[in-house]
Amino acid sequence: MNRKTAIIVGNGELTRDLSEIVDSAQFAMRFNEPKASIGMSGSRTDILMLAASSKPMQRRLTDPNFLASATFKAAKEVVLAYHPEIIRKYHPKPNFLSRLKGRRSDWTMRTIELVGAAGKEIRVMPPQFYIDGCSELGVPERRMCEVFPSTGFFGIRYVLSLLPAREWDVKLCGFSWEGWKRHAWLNERSWVEDRIANGRVSVLV
């Protein structure tokens, strides 16, 4: 049986134009606010996974260009990776001065309002989804206020749980495993390399 193709597009730079490959796939996932891959990875977006927390989400929600972007418009479903309970319990809180400027850690409800008004189906992942992901990466609960798995990791994990290996060939592109210092980059890279080694995913270069 010929397997279908799923492509998970990270937000890192691409070495070549993958637009035709991504748009001809049967499934594509993207994250937050793709920038480096614009014009290089097509437009197909079956799932857009968002991190509805902290300053970057606040900026997106106040930027009309975000909701007007090709990625957002193409998204068939928007998935919020972090449940409000997880944000409240584990994620960093803005300081007093930041709160005076309108900062807050949880933008879930505002995201639901705007994304829903744009006609998108929204899924909020349950708290256990986050807890199980941390466990897979070896992040103990005592460190869950210090180390935070990336949205990209949760997206890959989510897609692998949705798409059976016997039916789907899952490919990754645009992942550099670097960025915000509080993400568990080494653990995530090792986790992905294990799945590459056993043939569950491959890297599109």
Image (cartoon, rainbow, N blue to C red):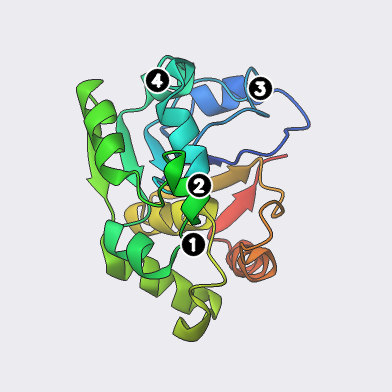
Residue where numbered disc 2 is placed: 98
Q: Amino acid at mark 1?
A: Pro
Measured Cα–Cα span from mark 2 to mark 1: 12 Å
Image: 181 above or below 205: below
Q: Amino acid at mark 4?
A: Leu
Tag 2 or tag 3, which sits nearer the N-term?
3
Tag 1 or tag 2, which sits nearer the N-term?
1
Image: 176 above or below 199: above
Q: Residues within 10 Å of mark 2 (few under 14, many from 20)?
A: few
Query: x%, y% of residue 186?
Result: 70, 68
Tag 2 or tag 4, which sits nearer the N-term?
4
Residue where numbered disc 3 is placed: 40
Badge nearest the viewer, 1 or 3:
1
Q: Amino acid at mark 3?
A: Met
Residue where numbered disc 4 is placed: 67
Under circle 1, the secondary element is loop
Q: Locate residue 93 relative to residue 123 in the image: left or right.
A: right
Query: x%, y% of residue 2?
Result: 44, 42
Circle number at residue 181:
none
Residue where numbered disc 1 is placed: 92
Measured Cα–Cα span from mark 1 to mark 3: 34 Å
- Residue at image point 42% right, 42% down: 50
- Residue at image point 24% right, 42% down: 109
- Residue at image point 25% right, 61% down: 126
